[in-house]
Image (tube, grey):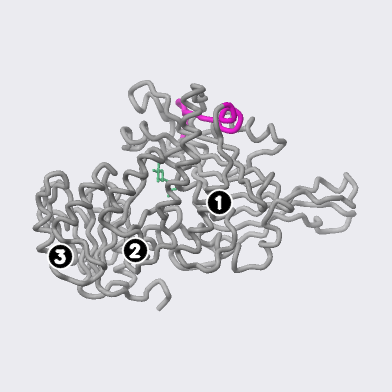
């Protein structure tokens, strides 16, 4: 048995928004995988709750379909699926009127087991649900609440949401999920930095020239028109996922893996980010929006056509960020993310400084700086680019090659989805990979001035053809500093 399969004590897992998209695509498949891994003890129960009027059997049928469609065929085991489905029940609830909450309370009963309330619903319902749970006595010391982004659209609205949840649950019971923190390679970043002595001495401005973080997606709006057009790439990806990656790259070594030790260090990074205000925004940020073009599936519409109305929402953003502390002063962090880009690639590139002096003649070839490339997806792995001598006689010729560690080649095990790990961390009560209130609010306090500057300066979105790496302004942003984006393929 591996550490992934240590069974946990029985628990009740209640999913609000149980019939929604997140539940179907992520939560049910993840819970099923944990069942298959042998992690559940009896009598673990999973309860769907939402406004849709369904019977228990109908919810079970919904879950079967979700497993069929979203779990790879090789992982679908008829016996395990039946055992999983037998755990499921359903209660229709209305968070506004309170209908159904007493039925939910009767079902969950006086159990002292860990109780997880997963809010896979719009943030506008967080307050109501928390109040209803409290009103019907469902909140026990062993209860935990999980909330999904977006946690607010600004620091002020994030505070309101945090206050609302905080009136009912203590901070140690609140799990703010950022699924990027559950990704294997993202956690591996901590192992790489703090379980090796090789990198840490070099991990600072004396040796690092700059850092690049790219999260490229090929998808467009999908079915999220109303959410996405109000959010845009800065709120949707940078405020949470990308800033969390910045924190993990830039934080000081925490004193332990204890949740608060790690989160204290991440918070310091967020607070050290140099504010991008007013005029600075047009130099340090680029907004883009995709136009018609091509994706792997063929010709695709532009954003405005997909949306069906005019819009100024950015589907791409590139930012030159700076961290004002001893370790990182003078080391830019170039961040970019967008929809309908050339490929689905997420990676972190650490580019080291050039060697201080070359003993080689120019004819031996260019000496490229060392790069550490941490690939989060799709093919997770780490590459360390170094200079070597080209083998063979004929004099000294230099070549840039990579030492490659592909996870798929090195490890046979299935790479669990981020949600599997994060859900089990909630059940175990481990908050290390979840965002603390102050982190979320500090992240907004860096995002808010950028949003304000864009509005004030009426900073336009620059068009880019779907299937490319974003607008030319993004290339200019980094090339102005004499650097180039790492070619992500
Ligand atoms: C979500 C965003 O948080 O992350 C989506 O709201 C985005 O817009 C998604 O597509 C990307 O996640 P992943 O795991 O596919 O990189």
Mark number for residue 175? Answer: none
Let me know if residue 294 is in the magenta part: yes
Q: Position of residue 214 (x, y in %)?
A: 55, 44
Q: Nearer the viewer, residue 282 or 85?
A: 282
Q: Nearer the viewer, residue 114 or 69?
A: 114
Quarter where residue 7 is shown = bottom left
On screen, residue 184 versus residue 20, left or right, reads right
What separation in Å lies between label 1 and label 3 (alpha carbons)? 41 Å
Quarter where residue 372 is shown = bottom right
Label 1 with label 3: CB-CB less than 8 Å: no
What separation in Å lies between label 2 and label 1 (alpha carbons)? 25 Å
- Asked if residue 140 is positioned above or below residue 453 in the image, the reply reads below
Q: Would you name the residue on which mark 3 appears?
A: 108
Q: Position of residue 114 (x, y in %)?
A: 26, 68
What separation in Å lies between label 3 and label 2 (alpha carbons)? 18 Å
1 vs 3, front mark: 1
On screen, residue 306 versus residue 455, left or right, reads left
**Magenta region, residue range:** 279-295
Q: Nearer the viewer, residue 394 or 317?
A: 317
Quarter where residue 61 is shown = bottom left
Rendered residue at 69%/38% (across/down) = 483
Mark number for residue 269? Answer: 1
Callout 2: 10 Å neighbours few (<14), some, many (20+)? many
Q: Secondary structure at mark 3?
A: helix
Q: Quadrant of ligand 1?
A: top left
- Asked if residue 319 is positioned above or below residue 171 in the image, the reply reads above
Q: Earlier in the sequence, mark 1 or mark 3?
A: 3
Q: Would you name the residue on which mark 2 appears?
A: 426
């Amino acid at each position: 048995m591996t550490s992934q399969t240590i069974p946990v004590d029985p628990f009740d897992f209640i999913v609000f928004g149980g019939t929604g998209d997140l539940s179907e695509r992520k939560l049910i498949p993840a819970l099923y995988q944990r069942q298959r891994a042998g992690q559940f003890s009896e009598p673990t129960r999973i309860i769907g709750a939402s406004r849709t009027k369904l019977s228990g059997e109908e919810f079970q049928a919904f879950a079967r379909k979700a497993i069929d469609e979203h779990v790879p065929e090789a992982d679908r085991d008829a016996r395990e699926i039946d055992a999983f489905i037998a755990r499921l029940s359903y209660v229709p609830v209305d968070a506004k009127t309170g209908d159904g909450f007493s039925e939910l309370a009767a079902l969950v009963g006086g159990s002292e087991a860990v109780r997880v309330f997963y809010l896979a619903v719009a943030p506008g319902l967080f307050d109501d649900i928390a109040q209803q749970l409290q009103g019907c006595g469902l909140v026990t010391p062993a209860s935990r609440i999980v909330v999904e982004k977006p946690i607010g659209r600004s620091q002020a609205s994030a505070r309101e949401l945090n206050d609302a949840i905080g009136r009912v649950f203590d901070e140690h019971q609140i799990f703010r999920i950022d699924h990027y923190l559950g990704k294997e390679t993202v956690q591996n970043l901590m192992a790489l930095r703090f379980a090796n002595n090789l990198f840490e001495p070099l991990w600072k401005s004396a040796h690092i020239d700059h850092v690049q973080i790219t999260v490229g997606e090929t998808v467009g709006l999908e079915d999220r028109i109303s959410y996405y057009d109000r959010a845009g790439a800065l709120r949707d990806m940078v405020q949470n996922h990308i800033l969390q990656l910045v924190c993990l790259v830039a934080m000081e070594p925490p004193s332990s893996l204890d949740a608060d030790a790690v989160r204290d260090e991440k918070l310091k990074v967020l607070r050290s980010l140099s504010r991008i205000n007013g005029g600075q925004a047009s130099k340090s940020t680029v907004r883009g929006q995709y136009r018609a073009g091509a994706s792997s599936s063929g010709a695709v519409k532009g954003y405005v056509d997909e949306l069906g109305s005019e819009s100024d929402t950015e589907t791409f953003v590139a930012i030159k960020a700076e961290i004002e502390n001893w370790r990182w002063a003078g080391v830019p962090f170039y961040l970019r993310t967008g929809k309908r880009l050339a490929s689905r690639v997420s990676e972190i590139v650490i580019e080291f400084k050039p060697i201080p002096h070359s003993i080689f003649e120019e004819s031996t070839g260019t000496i490229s700086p060392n790069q550490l490339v941490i690939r989060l997806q799709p093919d997770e792995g780490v590459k360390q680019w170094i200079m070597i001598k080209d083998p063979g006689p004929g004099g000294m010729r230099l070549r840039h090659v990579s030492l490659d560690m592909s996870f798929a080649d090195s490890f046979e095990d299935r790479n669990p989805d981020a949600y599997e790990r994060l859900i089990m961390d909630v059940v175990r009560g481990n908050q290390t990979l979840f965002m603390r209130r102050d982190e979320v609010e500090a992240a907004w306090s860096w995002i808010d001035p950028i949003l304000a500057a864009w509005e004030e300066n009426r900073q336009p979105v620059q068009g880019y053809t779907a299937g490319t790496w974003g607008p030319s302004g993004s290339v200019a942003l980094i090339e102005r500093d004499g650097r180039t984006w790492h070619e992500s393929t």
